[in-house]
Structure formats: C-alpha cells, structure tokens
Amino acid sequence: MNPNDGKYSRPLWAEVDLDKLRGNVATIRRYLKPETKILGVIKANAYGHGIVEVGETLSKEGIETLGVASLNEALALKKKRVKSEILILGYSHEDFSDEIVANDIAQTVGYEFQINALAKAARKLKKRAKVHVKIDTGMTRMGCLPEDAHELITKALGNRNIETKGIYTHFARADEINGVYTKKQYYQFKRIIDDFEKVLKGVDIHCSNSAAVLNFPEYQEDMVRIGIALLGNYPAFQVANPLPLKPVFSLKTRVVEVKKVPPSTGVGYSHRHRTTNNVKIAVIPVGYADGYSTLLSNRGEVLVKGRRYPVVGQVSMDFATFECPPDSDVEIHDEVTLLGRDNGKEISLYEMASWMRCPIYEALCLMGPRIERRYINSKETSKKPGKSSSSKKLKRSKYAK
C-alpha cells in the first residue's frame, strides 16, 4: 500500500489492459468467418478507454478499419500514423470536406450534397474522396431512407472523384435475441444491396454491430462493426453466443480518510444516509465530476481486499463515502476497486450500470478526463532488453488530462 505508487496527487485511476484487448481480438476472430473484416468502433475516446492507445493496439493487431464519431477523433489517430483505414461514422459539416479528403479519411454519407462536397474537395486536391453510404432501414437516425438509397448509391458509384468503400445500415434492436425487427431490417438492406451486386466489387457491405455479431452471426457480410465486445463486454445481459471476453477497463482509487462514528450520524450532503450502528466511514476521492454518478448514492458498492462495502450518503462532485464495520481492517491508502476485480470478487460493468440506471455504454463513456488512464501492455515491455514477454508494465497515457 504505497501512497506514492504511480506518483499521483489524487489517487483515482483506470487500468486499461491492452493485453486483454488483444485477447478479445483473437477470440472474436476465431468466432467470425475467416474472410470477415473487422471495423473496430472506438468513438467517444474508445468508450472512455483512450482512443489513441486503443486505436494503435487494434491497428497493430490487424483490424482493417477504425470507426470514430468525428473528424477530431480521426485526426488524433492520423497524427499517430495509425495504419488502419479510418471511417467517420458520424456527421461532418461539408465545410470540412477538404480536411477529410486531404487526410485520406472515409466519411459516412446519407445525402447527395455530402457526396458533392466531398467530390469537389477531391477534384481540388486531385484525389478521390472515400465514402461509406449509410441506409436507414429502421433506426430512424442517420442515413438515407430506403426509397432514396438506389439513387444515392448510383451517384456515389458513378462519381469519378468518389471511391465508395462501403455501404451499410445499423440495427436498432439487435440486442433482442428473438430478432424479429433485426431480420426485417436485414432483408430490407439486402434487397437494396442485391440490386447492385454486379458493381460492388471492392465495396464492403456491413450491418452487424456487437449485438448482431453475437446474436445473428449469419449477418456478417463483408465486415462487422465491433466496439463494446472488443473491450470485453457483452452489449446486453444475455446474448445468443457468449464468448470468453475479458473486460479491458477497471476503475480504482484509494481511501483518503477513515473515521469511526456512532449511530445516527448523518453522512454527506443533506444527510441522505444516517448510520444505524457504530461504523467506520471511509472517504474516497471520486465523484460525479469524474463520471461516478449521483445515482450510485446509497446504491453502489466498492471492493476493498476482496470484501464488498456499500456506498453511503450523497456522491458529491469530488468525493464519495462507503461504510464498513468498526472492526474492519480498512485503512487510509487502501486500494478500492470501483469497477473490476479484486481478490476473486468483481463489480461488473453490468452491475454498475444497473445501479446507475443507464446502458453499459453510458457508464463507460461517463468516465471523465480527470481519471488518469494507465495502460497495461506486456508487448511494449517485452521489447526492452532483460524483460520477459509475460511481464506487464503500467504506462501513463500522454493524452490523459
């Protein structure tokens, strides 16, 4: 229990295990058809894991394409010379077409004006703009409507300044194992694609996200888009084909104060918790400003030395408190696991998300920049003389704020 471990001033950190990420890639590849490509979805800072570190790792593992939400995310990867293709899954204003084309980034399009803007930029730069045409088959979000898809695909394929890299749709309810609505979406998408079958050589067709990959492997097509599963989590509590995935992200802190208090002591703002016995109250430096939600107040739990303790009182901006028996061995500087494993016990992402009453994706994405990311990466360590390939090194991210 060294309070100076890692040389931090505020003991709150996430451990992101890149070795487990590599293992998840291998597990998923064994499950997929040999010819199926993977688009690794790493938008929203790789769901809080760190877009640069995760992106570099996935690229080195042979992931063909990386999907991001915005031009800024794409440029962060380009600056690190990540070799994988990069696709902006989200919207980019047409005024940024020059920058997208100049940096050899693929852009999702759902309207003709987007194609025209990218083609204009490509002509000026004497390049071809890369696009993936998105069809909205039932998500009612981004993409052209099915009745407009034929015209849009024809324009994209017929423009000599445009290189159509892919055509795709997105399933709205693939986490439902019965799959009634997913099948409806899939067959509507396939009817459109089949009309262009003879002219789609080199164009990747994709529709499956993590949930669809695990529930409907027959819908793999040329490429699958996987995000949450690569990071070791199932997209839903139940999936049809569970794989031995390992969560990459864990969240930890240390006890900074411990005090013994009598019964009827109020804890935290508004005294939303009152002790009923003689207890210890331990203070930890994590709060809602870090993404540790107020919904965890009087609901969440933590692990210390493999034992569970309840979060009590109102989670505040910078601190939370948990309660333990007066004879417990909880002390200042003890490591506290908020998410992850400790001595054979686990607080899972599904458990935390249920306490927060939110999807698991949201729980991860809420983990803010005040949380230091430390990367476990045995491959990096193994490159150094005198180190075995099985040893692990914790690396502080250069991009953590």
Image: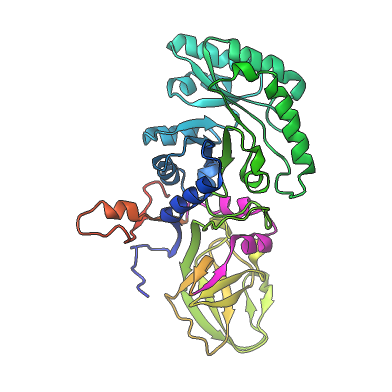
In the image: residue 312, left or right of residue 379: right
Residue 106, image x, y percentages: 51, 26
| Res. 17 image quadrant | bottom left
Query: Which residue appears at 46% of the width and 9% of the height?
Result: 124
Q: Is residue 347 magenta?
A: yes
| Res. 102 image quadrant | top left
Residue 237, image x, y percentages: 68, 58
Q: Nearer the viewer, residue 316 or 307?
A: 307
Look at the picture and state if 178 lies above or below 315: above
Q: Is residue 189 magenta?
A: no
The colour scheme used here is rainbow
Residue 43, image x, y percentages: 54, 41
Look at the picture and state if 58 lies above or below 90: below
Query: Which residue appears at 55% of the width and 25% of the height?
Result: 107
**Count of marks, rendered view:** 0
* Residue at the limit of the structure toward the front, as seen here: 34
Query: Which residue appears at 54% of the width and 43% of the height?
Result: 44
Residue 208, image x, y percentages: 64, 39
In the image: residue 269, left or right of residue 30: right
Q: Which residues are magenta?
A: 344-370
Q: Nearer the viewer, residue 267 or 97?
A: 97
In the image: residue 219, left or right of residue 229: right
Q: Can residue 373 be seen in this snapshot?
A: no
Look at the picture and state if 40 lies above or below 396: above
Report the quarter where the N terminus lies.
bottom left
Q: Can residue 333 be seen in this snapshot?
A: yes
